Image (spheres, rainbow, N blue to C red):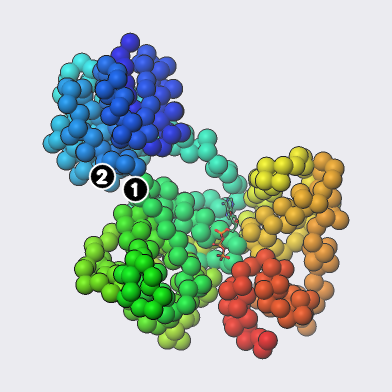
């Protein structure tokens, strides 16, 4: 039975590949680091090595160089790493396969390697195959993971946009109300992009004081300013090769906007206090729940930066615009909360489902998650009943305008005023009650010109 060593740090993918190859008559050993891979190579008589190009401790090329024996090495690459794959072949790799690959592709590459045939030459066909409807190995891994199958038209559209933009290097601006999943969306773009082996770094621009923003972006050297007690790596450097997520990007000061723009244009940064330029290759995804276009119009946000950040934009739908997904989310959060709180609540009773369906969900998915977690904690039986829901959900707003209805904006403003009154104008408590962050509450108070 031919023996194959798979060196891959994505363990679920490696296990799936192992299962598949075992079923096809191979004896498969797994290794998740370059170092361990080398050890396995010494200990076993191998027929083929299958290695990822990017490993936590090595890059695949380093590994190929260190293999003395004449064992064919097949490298597995992300789909935009063809250049590196070609380099790997120059260094002695037998062939490469681009992820996602189909079972047939990997099998025939391995069989060719075993027969001592030359590598496949038609890489273009391999690239094209990826876009066919055939089930690919890595797609099935995703399906087995924590992937929720949403059904609403709004989520289908969002998913389409994510799939469309993820493989590109375009900067993406995500807009949407608080708690609608902007960060989740950014992570999803990153994890389905060719950068997914490199870091995803999130920076909350709304939470950093403007004097410290440059240091957060670019890092600093020890002693470069008061308080710089040690060297610091900035977010750009930390995200090198990967994705930098700038949350609440609209909150950046004008000066910080200029610094950010310069770094994006030049693709180089300098740590504060250093003259050394560092090249950075970072994809930017930003998010805002403000109207950045309006901010541009008012001169609060630089138009050139806006266009840099907004090569592609998408909007995360509010929960009321994707109510068909409500039960999927609810069941998912119920099971998460059970796990977290060590409970075994089975379901929501009919009345609770009715309340869920008619409530406005101003805090969107985050609010739903919090409501369910609280309810699970308070539930003693096996079904959530309405008495464990927050009182606000049971007493819907009765304030109406002259035409008898409220616009979404009026409703939100009304909710903010109520929350502030209920908490004696304590903004932290009001933010908690509204299930939004403090900075979001401040933004909304400014937006509505509320004088508190
Ligand atoms: N598709 C999803 N699947 C599972 N959980 C989700 C999903 N979308 C959002 N959530 C959950 O909802 C909460 C809010 O999501 P997230 O932080 O991404 O929203 P946001 O729009 O970035 O919020 P904010 O504007 O307040 O920063 C998180 O706890 C997240 O785990």
Can you name the residue that lies furthest to the bottom here?
451
Q: Residue 286 at what x, y percent from top left? A: 44, 65
Quarter occupied by the N terminus = top left
> Element under label 1?
loop
Q: Please name the residue shown 85% across and 43% down the image.
A: 381
| Front-lying residue, 210 or 143 | 210
Q: Please name the residue shown 59% across and 66% down the image.
A: 178
- Characterize the local packing of mark 2: few (<14), some (14-19) or many (20 or more) Cα atoms within 10 angstroms: some
When asked about the image quadrant of residue 128, the answer is top left
Q: Earlier in the sequence, mark 2 or mark 1?
A: 2
Q: Please name the residue shown 46% across and 33% down the image.
A: 12
Which residue is labeled 2 in the image?
81
- Asked if residue 170 shows in the view, the reply is no
Are dots 2 and 1 in contact, CB under 8 Å? Answer: yes
Please indicate whether residue 88 sits to the left or right of residue 360 in the image.
Answer: left
- Picture layout, residue 435 above or below residue 403: above
- Picture layout, residue 333 above or below residue 226: above
When asked about the image quadrant of residue 115, the answer is top left
| Front-lying residue, 397 or 51 | 51
């Amino acid at each position: 039975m031919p023996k194959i060593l798979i060196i891959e740090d994505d363990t679920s993918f490696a296990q799936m590949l192992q299962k598949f190859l075992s079923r096809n008559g191979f004896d498969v050993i797994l290794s998740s680091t370059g170092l361990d891979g080398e050890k396995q190579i010494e200990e076993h008589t191998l027929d083929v090595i299958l290695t990822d190009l990017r490993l936590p401790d090595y890059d695949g090329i380093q590994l190929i160089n260190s293999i003395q024996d004449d064992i064919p090495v097949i490298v597995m690459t992300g789909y935009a790493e063809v250049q590196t794959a070609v380099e790997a072949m120059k260094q002695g790799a037998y062939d490469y396969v681009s992820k996602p690959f189909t079972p047939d592709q990997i099998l025939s590459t391995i069989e060719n390697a075993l027969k001592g045939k030359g590598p496949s030459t038609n890489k273009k066909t391999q690239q094209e195959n990826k876009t066919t409807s055939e089930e690919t190995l890595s797609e099935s891994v995703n399906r087995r993971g924590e992937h929720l199958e949403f059904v609403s038209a709004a989520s289908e559209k969002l998913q389409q946009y994510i799939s469309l933009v993820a493989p590109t290097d375009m900067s993406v601006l995500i807009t949407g109300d608080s708690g609608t999943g902007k960060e989740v969306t950014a992570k999803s773009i990153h994890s389905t992009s060719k950068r997914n082996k490199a870091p995803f770094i999130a920076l909350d621009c709304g939470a950093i004081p403007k004097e410290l923003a440059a240091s957060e972006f670019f890092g600093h050297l020890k002693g470069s300013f008061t308080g710089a007690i040690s060297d610091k790596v900035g977010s750009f450097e930390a995200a090198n090769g990967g994705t930098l997520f700038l949350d609440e990007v609209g909150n950046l000061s004008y000066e910080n906007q200029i610094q950010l723009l310069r770094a994006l244009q030049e693709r180089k940064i300098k740590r504060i206090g250093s003259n050394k330029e560092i090249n950075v290759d970072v994809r930017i995804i930003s998010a805002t729940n403000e109207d950045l276009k309006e901010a541009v119009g008012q001169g609060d946000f630089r138009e050139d930066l806006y266009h840099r950040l907004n090569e592609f934009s998408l909007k995360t739908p509010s929960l009321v615009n994707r109510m068909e997904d409500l039960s999927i989310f609810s069941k998912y959060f119920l099971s998460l909360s059970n796990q977290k709180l060590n409970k075994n609540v089975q379901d929501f009773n009919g009345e609770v489902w009715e309340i869920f369906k008619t409530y406005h969900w101003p805090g969107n998915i985050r609010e739903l998650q919090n409501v369910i977690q609280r309810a699970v904690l308070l539930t003693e039986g096996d079904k959530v009943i309405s008495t464990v829901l927050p009182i606000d959900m049971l007493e819907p707003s009765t304030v109406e305008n002259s035409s008898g209805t409220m616009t979404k904006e009026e409703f939100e403003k009304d909710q903010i005023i109520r929350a502030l009154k209920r908490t004696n104008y304590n903004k932290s408590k009001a933010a908690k009650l509204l299930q939004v962050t403090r900075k979001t509450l401040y933004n909304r108070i400014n937006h509505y010109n509320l004088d508190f």
